Amino acid sequence: MAAVTIDSLLQNPTLVFRPKAKVLLKPPRSLDCSRNRKLPLSRGSCLCSFNPRRTIHVVRASSSETALIGNFDISSSDDILYKDIFPVKRIEKVEGKFFIRLDRSKDQHDWQLTVGCSLPGKWILHWGVSYLGDSGSEWDQPPKGMRPPGSIPIKDYAIETPLKKLSEGDIFHEVKIDFNPISEIAAIHFVLKDEETGAWYQHRGMDFKVPLVDYLEDDGNIVGAKRGFGVWSGALQQFSNVLLKSEASHADSQNNSIESKDSKNKNRCLEGFYEEQSIVKEVSVGNLVSVAVRKSPETGKVIVCLETDIPGDVVVHWGVCRDDAKIWEIPAAPYPPETTVFKNKALRTLLQPKATGNRSGALFTLDEEHFGFLFVLKLDENTWLKFKENDFYVPLLGTSSVPGQYGQSDSTSEEISSKSYTDGIINEIRNLVSGLSSEKSQKTKKKEVQESILQEIEQLAAEAYSIFRSSITTVPDEVVSETETTKPAVKISSGTGTGFEILCQGFNWESHKSGRWYMELKEKASEISSLGFTVIWLPPPTESVSPEGYMPKDLYNLNSRYGTIDELKELVKSLHEVGMKVLGDVVLNHRCAHFKNQNGVWNIFGGRLNWDDRAVVADDPHFQGRGNKSSGDNFHAAPNIDHSQEFVRKDLKEWLGWLREEIGYDGWRLDFVRGFWGGYVKDYLEASGPYFAVGEYWDSLSYTYGEMDHNQDSHRQRIVDWINATNGTAGAFDVTTKGILHSALERCEYWRLSDQKGKPPGVVGWWPSRAVTFIENHDTGSTQGHWRFPGGKEMQGYAYILTHPGTPAVFYDHIFSHHRSEIASLISVRNRNGIHCRSLVKIVKAERDVYAAIIDEKVAMKIGPGYYEPPSGSQRWSLALEGRDYKVWETS
Amino acid sequence: MEVSVIRSSSQAKISKTELGCRDLRFCFGKSNDKNKIFSRKPNSVCFDSQISRFRKAGLRFTLKAVHSDPILESKSPATSKSLDRLRLFVGLPLDAVSDGNSVNHARAIGAGLKALKLLGVEGVELPVWWGVVENEMGKYDWSGYLAVAEMVQKAGLKLHVSLCFHASSQPRIPLPKWVTKIGESQSSIFFADRSGQHYQQCLSLAVDDLAVLDGKTPVQVYQGFCESFKSTFSPFMGSTITGISMGLGPDGELRYPSHHKPAKSGTITGVGEFQCYDTNMLNLLKQYAEANGNPLWGLGGPHDAPTYDQAPNSNSFFKDHGGSWESPYGDFFLSWYSSELVSHGNRLLSLVSSIFGDTEVNVYGKVPLMHSWYKTRAHPSELTAGFYNTASRNGYEAVAEMFARNSCKIILPGMDLSDEHQPHDALSSPESLLAQIRTTCNKHRVEVAGQNLASGAPGGLEQIKKNMLGENPIDLFTYQRMGAHFFSPEHFPSFTEFVRSLSQPELHPDDLPSDEAEATESVQTSSDPNIHLQTA
């Protein structure tokens, strides 16, 4: 195993997480803090996310903090006017090695693939196999025997196995996979994942492929060959190829990487190999910038002392200001050494290294009259460190009005102040709890603070949840226990709205034909609202290659076959006037290109979002994208957008924000969310803050011999998984319930409407608050009729979804049909009895020809030709509604 | 369109929401002669369709509307209790530090700590494992735990450390390797049941003072561990670290591993088995029997006790009437069996309280809540676990007295359990047992801290609240345990509500101003300036 040495003398104690792991450190010249878009989602861009008063100190900051403060050149501490320490975060690269080895295992019979990595981290091998005769790049799960202990199956196509250190002293984390070369396996595929950062390490944008037979097509990702080693998270920007090293015992195979085509053996002539490559990981490193202001007793001037432990050359880009507006000005000389004037606007001073420690600093002497000292730090041409995306600001005048920290030169006092701040927050939370405080003047500002704290708690919890969850092997039972379902909706969340929403799908497949749908719908606004709907879903508004709008092209062009952007705004306004919330149908999965690339493939975009082929996923050969592999399924008719690209996400977030602002949309119906990871949806929803959001996750139910299975748990699990990935920020259409209703009604098999646990068999049985139940939409019904609800039984379907928990959605065609009055009555029963998305449903009958349930003990219903009457017990039931094969009662 | 109450979320407010409904009825009731205008639900108010003009307008009102709090609060000074006295801790993951002494999920724990701090939680509980720290006898590696303690300190939270001298199976945290190795050749360091099966998750209490660990006694080894802990963590003692629990047996609890074979799911917990069959226990029994002049009683445990998962009546020892437990032999055996457990507790607690006596930390020991079969006369589950507590004898007197003697406090788990959620056939009563133990502790002035058995038990949070705020309130509670479930969308919101509701206990409906005159009055004060009707 190769020895890893320390390449640089940079001493940064904060970097070494596990002191035993020797890592290769590279000087941090290429670090980039302000344009940090290569980081995966979980990291986000991290400028100085810091507020000096409220930070709970990070562990690593502490040691150097004391040192830094202690190091101040304070002649007489009484003169200190101001003093503060700003933690800053930078991204630094740590370099290490990564190897792949294929060799015979000890018994010389089986073979063993070993993958190791020398960087500290929680490394996971995400892998699968392909079998002989497989075509395409799909993975399969390896046979059980091949999975090392500790492996976790990921869906049905991959395995995740953690890399471990064999013993404490080892440099490499590694994983070994044993396999028998006589099996049907053609190749092992893998990518490497760092659980700590969420970064994926791939091979030229594809998986690593270790072929076990010699005639595999080379897609460019076969390892063993001397190729560049790429990474798609973008966390790594450069790779240097390291010389191949072969183990002595395999010296003869040194030149024959396993894919060598000249192997004569018919089926398998496995050759061992060992390949090592360098790997770079970006870690966030905390540094400190300390500033002290004191007054020189002799000259009466103000002296600003700035110091930092950021290694390397640091330039302070600085100026002064006269008032609160913080307009930069250049003060009068003298300036510190190594100062230049920058474009007459600011000064640049190179910090001078201090004699002790790895610190550098400068002293700035200023006239008394200045109000404040402004600065940012420049590390190199592209790397600036700012304070919360703003300039650092040091008050020079009036500082005495903020006493407290002056002259306190030990770090504990700082902590105390931050602690008292958190205590203050806690008190505020408690006040919020006590809610109706007796004081009449509850200031809105305070309220905002409290809300932001609650949000912060939620975000922290979500972060913790995602990490903990990713490390447990068992899938948690998604069933929401009854005690929890009775818990009232505590607030509006984008996954549920208020919890009492009823959705109207405000168009069908033909709506584009008139060219003035927006205007037509506007006339119906008050009518739709009066039926009891609270939310309406409008058709996709963007310019589109297909008239219905689902093949968007220029996202900022909102003139479509449904009408112009102004008509759309007018429509939204009238819908708001009648008290409805409006959902925009946003297609984020794919986008039609404006131009062809050099190969004649349509994958270059135009318009305001003029992305190139880096915005297109790499794994659809039709569109030759240069992005990463898709995080979901592919939609084959248009280029699928690569949401793992930070610039794509930034643009989409901006677009959603624009739609909210410009058009007034309140929320989203998200098209084809199967196509990308739900975590991105969460990101979009958090950025655009919708009132309500629902995703279309539509895939096929399970059938055996053409007959639908009773148990559709795997189907609903996939939907629930998606909702989970969005962290519950979005609901999803309950396709499972629709499918089961189809079978139950069509074939008179009403027993299907209860699952093994006696709960509703759809998503609504598992996660009711996030299930948007429906029986028809523009795809399944209308003039497309891909999967039409059984004819004549629509009202039974509505009797089910409009009395049950979940958020029901009613299709436009059904509202404006002879079903209208029955639907209106069902909605009013629902509203009258306060049935909401978390209502409790008790299934009392699920037999061949009848299904009956009691909801919240207030509404009873039955569908099917069979007999059912609610029990005549303590409650008195009166018939509220009756139609063909359905009845609804309420308590009187 | 619904009229819904937009609440900013606290459990405590539900009662007020209901008040809000009531108020509103007076606001709008005049225009309507139908009696039923609202259907009242805890969180929703629905207008009858007759007032559809309001519905169309998308009426919403916020809770700010109701303005009768000052009265309510002044009425209930007895029940309101500030969070300052009532300290809530949350357990860190069992494997927060595991093999290799690295911190697992450090980032998640960091985020979790911040969230807890913001919520107003007092501190966290950290299990410190013998098997992680003392990999070689007498050599301690505390690095991982130090890192966690530092994180906790930075987060401004307190730390309660549980010293775990047992092993855990899920997640797997074994005893130190060198101990396991000794056990391989010398299995008598572990407890054994009647069939001779050894329980290898902790040492038998019979070897406490025998030099079985490479020439040292377990008590000496525990002592070395505690002293090393104390000196290593001295910067945190009393400031960040406010409490220490001493591991006293299986799962850290003072008991015999009588129920270590888990009941098959869906079946009722059996009575468990006596664990007095390792050679050292049998020696002690023999000596005791001979000293009492009944050498024949010292040859083994009761021959007529049922096995692990059997019901009390399946053999004659625990029978409600005429069971051997009531015979002189039964009393002889149970007295010995339970006194061995108390002496073991005494040995360990006197050790820790002398070690930590000069610090400001409180020392705790955990006593289990063996609640199944509590409604039978014999209380078999308690007997096999080592508590000689029956319908006619309070077995917790000796235990509480021992804790009092060592100035230690008791941690009682299972404060989330309520009788109504126990299987009927188990004749179990966690609530009565809890009450009995707490009364006994009060008598001996032993403070009791609470713990829950598992998060997510039905009605668990409510039950905990009842225990924390009831007539005999608990001032320290440790909620178990941080992890994926804890932060999940299914659990965390209810926990948040729970924490917040502790600061202002829910009012019993009876405490609300109930006569209509008063209510009407409050409506008048509240109707104009304070009710905010917002059209959505």
Image (cartoon, grey):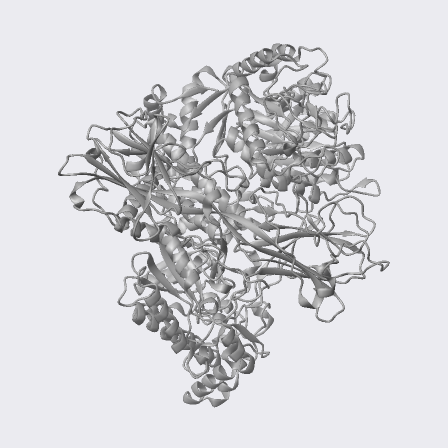
Say which quadrant the N terminus of chain A sits in.
bottom right
- Of A838 and A784, nearer the camera is A784
On screen, residue B181 versus residue A796, left or right, reads left
- Of A734 and A247, nearer the camera is A247
On screen, residue B65 versus residue A23, left or right, reads left
Is residue A366 placed above or below B267 in the rendered structure? above
The image shows a total of numbered marks equal to 0
Image coordinates for residue A25, horizontal then vertical, percent: 48, 53
- Of B117 and B178, nearer the camera is B178
Q: Quadrant of residue A547?
A: top right
Image coordinates for residue A884, horizontal then vertical, percent: 74, 25
Task: Name the residue located 42 percent from the left edge and 23 percent from the top edge.
Answer: B24
Say which quadrant the C terminus of chain A sits in.
top right
Quick one: which residue is furthest to the right in this view?
Answer: A266
Quick one: which residue is furthest to the left in this view?
Answer: A298
Image coordinates for residue A676, horizontal then vertical, percent: 64, 36
Can residue A372 be seen here? The reply is: yes
Is residue B461 placed above or below B159 in the rendered structure? above
Is residue A674 placed above or below B25 in the rendered structure? below
On screen, residue A368 versus residue A811, left or right, reads left
Image coordinates for residue B97, horizontal then vertical, percent: 47, 60
Can residue B412 be seen here? The reply is: no
